Amino acid sequence: MTPPLTTRPRPSLSAVPWRTFLAVALAAALSVGLLVGVGGSAPANAAATGTIVSLTFDDANADQLPAEQKLVSKGMKGTFFLVSGFIGAPNYLTLTLIVRASEVAGLPGPALPSTVPPTSPATGTVSAAVSTAPTGAVTVMVPPITSPPAAAPAPPAAADPPAGSAGLPPLTAPYDTVLRTSGGDRVAYLTFDDGPSKYTGRVLDILAAAGVKATFCQIGSQLGDYPDTERRLIGDGHTLCNHSWTHPANIAALPPTDIDQQIGRTQQALAGLGVTARYFRAPAGDFGTTSTLRQICQQYQTRPLGWAVDPQDWKKPGTPAIVQTVLGTITPGAVILLHDGGGNREQTLAALPAIITGLHTQGYTLAALPPDGTG
């Protein structure tokens, strides 16, 4: 606590306007951060509170009280703490204040009521109630200066991301699952992997003759070799799907930066053709045992695409086997896997007309997956 101030002889300050003295004293104390105590010592937490300034005013007559109103309206704005007060005989007013270092002398401020209501420490203001006694003395009631309230506890740390997520954002629908079927109606979706190639144009011929649209999952590094085929494929209204840049085996096991390049470079190449792919099919359909590959798909807004029907035409099992597997395992909404690249595709080309005819006979409509990824 600040001990009571004692009266001591003081030189007359009547020649110096008290407003000027106040502004100069506050500015000096604030600029150098001095602690000036008159008749007492600083509170223990003064360094954390502000600068202690003791000022003496001449001609502090009763009609000028309560003095703290004059001080606030003329000398400083906002935050001040009256620590002690004393009126000498007959014309000296001594006030000891704690002034926050952020306040600047001379700023205008509204006059405060004679009793300053308490406010929360969180606002940076400690209240001090001041009243005028009948004798004209200033009576100061000083509350204890306490530390600000403890800060709210920090929120709990976020849970660790799933294994293999590489710090990527959590998966959200629809990227959290691999699309294998779409809808429940008698609609089926032909998809062709590993093109473009020399076989892609012939696949387009068969589809055009049957009036069928399909989805082509393309390898980015091959796009530049077949510009005419690409223009035709897009012009015919088929959907394009990202199938990586170089078709690496076990793409999900690659470092995340490599996965990003495999998807990103192909997206850029397709964008050069005026297409934004909204599907990604992993080579061999392997999305791995962690979420990393799907999370990177999510970054590119490409839905993970799988299949529900696989005749394994890439193994060249024979045309009848390819047709029989497709027609015998088809279900409503199924995505069908075929290939237009990656090797000799003569068997696939021979099987395709029979597959289309057989599915139509079973009442299926063949469609391309929606290009906007809503399939």
Image (cartoon, rainbow, N blue to C red):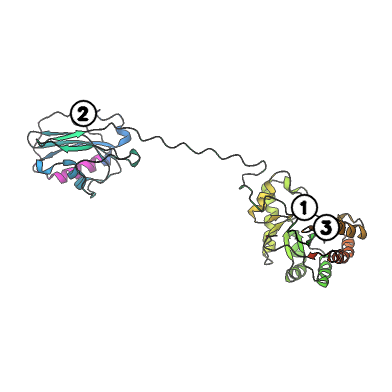
Spatial CA distance of label 1 from label 2 is 82 Å
| Residue 338, image x, y percentages | 82, 59
Which numbered disc flags the more N-terminal residue, 2 or 3?
2
Helix, strand or loop at disc 1? helix
- The residue that disc 1 covers is 283
Which callout, 2 or 3, points to the residue nearer the camera? 3
| Residue type at the position of mark 3 | Ile
Per the image, is 257 magenta?
no
Per the image, is 15 magenta?
yes
Q: Which residues are magenta?
A: 9-29
Spatial CA distance of label 1 from label 3 is 22 Å
Label 3: how many Cα within 10 Å (few below 14, some 14–19, many 20+): many
| Residue type at the position of mark 1 | Pro
- The residue that disc 2 covers is 40
- The residue that disc 3 covers is 330
Name the side, left or right, on which 113 lies relative to 170: left
| Residue 345, image x, y percentages | 87, 61
- Vertical position of residue 17 compared to residue 369: above or below: above
Q: Nearer the viewer, residue 34 or 41?
A: 41
Q: Quadrant of residue 302?
A: bottom right
Label 1: how many Cα within 10 Å (few below 14, some 14–19, many 20+): many
| Residue 198, image x, y percentages | 83, 65
Mark 2 and mark 3 residues within 8 Å of each other at the beta carbon: no
Helix, strand or loop at disc 2? loop
Q: Give me the residue at 16% from left, 34% from top.
A: 139
